[in-house]
Image (cartoon, rainbow, N blue to C red):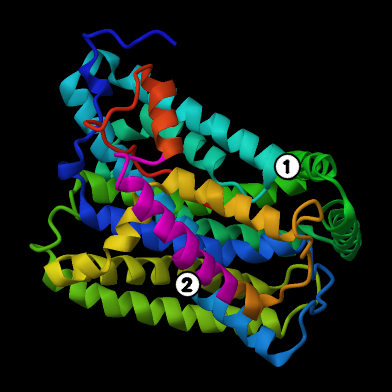
Amino acid sequence: MNAVPTAAPAATSLPAAERIATLDILRGFALMGIFIMNMPGFNTSFFVEADGSHLWPGPVDRIAEMVREALFSGKFNSMFSMLFGIGFTIQFTRMLERDPEHATGFYLRRLSVLALFGVVHAWVFWPGDVLHTYAILGLLLVLGLRRISDRAVMVLIAACLVYPALSGLLRVLIFTPEMVAERTALAKAFEASNNLAFGQGSFWDMVRENTRMMNFFYSGWVNLWGTLGWWVMMSLTMLIGLLAGRRRWVQRAAELMPQIRRLTWVALAVGLGCGVAFTLIFEFNRTPGPSLIKVLGGICYHLSRLGMMIFYVLVIVRLAQQPAWQRRLAPLAAAGRMPLTNYLMQTTLGLVLFQHWGLGLWMQVGPALSLLLAVVLFWMVQVPWSLWWLRRHERGPLEALWARVTYGQPSKRTAVAASPAPSA
């Protein structure tokens, strides 16, 4: 690729000394949470328990499942989505200030590269990918949403909050018992083919099955309706990040500390209360098909993922204001400086551990052990690896490749890591 013209200083990345440590810590913490919430998807079919059964009936595993759902599920891809919105605002604003003529083109190219990473990751390696989602939502930010007012952003946030209730009620009205039976049978068929491809098949069997699953998620009106719910959830937190970036909430943390203290406990109450509620609702209403009580459970789930995510963010923001805690959290910050590399490394670890062509542990690790395994691998593999790499390089290997392809210039120690990327 040709080098970037000298008239395009917008391609210069942020110097490492100017990085916002709090954001790096948050990305690192989000990576740990993403690994925990994604581990079951590496080990079992996405369609497991579609008929309401329990794959892991033991009490320890049941408790671990409930803890994972209440404290981790959905909270950390939401956190990364919010960080993407903040990072977009910071980076794109800086690029516009340096070179307004080329900034939009560079950022669109940057998002296109991220989309390519995501498409390959999702359709070839793992259908739980979030990179393609972030890239496409990022395109919407660049091409339209960055120009709208804060009031309009808040209206969109409100619409995203209301959507789950409206969608759930519409499902109750539309879905017939025959449709429910058909969808359940389809999910069971996918579970069987997943078990065959991932638990007994070759690498190429895995690729074919992943491609088949992704094509399924993006075809047919019922599947697209379900996928739309996912996109709305990611849009909600990305819009919150856009607003936070515009109003410089992270940079103004010390000034906003009284409000942060109060909101921390409100977020915890909402997150935990709704987390317990949706966990119990879905545990005692496992029969397939929509119902009014499940609509309430869905609302509680969405409020829980938002409340707990905000709680985690505010606690880290408060801790990061203290130098002693910045030192303690530095290992998390190192992992957070390499989000794309570490996110895709998690997929690599998961595939090698569980696929038949790897160590072949498919469906042999229950919820309790998988939760422990994710924590151990993150702290014993990913964090040491990140610390070791960053002692020798300015940014992660895939972050450097991303910058090289985007800007057409070699990675140098004077450049910094790219803005936040993923998740799961």
Helix, strand or loop at disc 1?
Answer: helix
Q: Can residue 154 be seen in this view?
A: no
Q: Which residue is found at the position 49% from the left and 79% from the top?
A: 274
Mark 2 or 1: the one toward you: 1
Secondary structure at numbered mark 2: helix
Asked whether residue 24 is in view, the answer is yes
| Residue, far left | 255
Rendered location of residue 198, percent (x, y): 82, 54
In the visual, does 47 lie left or right of 75? right
Does residue 110 appear to the left or right of 411 in the view shown?
right
Q: In this view, does 223 lie above or below 165?
A: above
Q: Gap between marks 2 and 1, in whole Å?
A: 27 Å
Residue topped by disc 1: 214
Mark 2 is on which residue type? Ser
- Kindly identify the residue that appears in the image at 66 percent across and 89 percent down: 60
Give the x, y percent position of residue 57: 77, 86
Identify the residue under disc 2.
304
Indicate the quadrant where residue 291 lies: bottom right
User: What segment carries the magenta color?
Assistant: 372-396
Q: Is residue 388 magenta?
A: yes
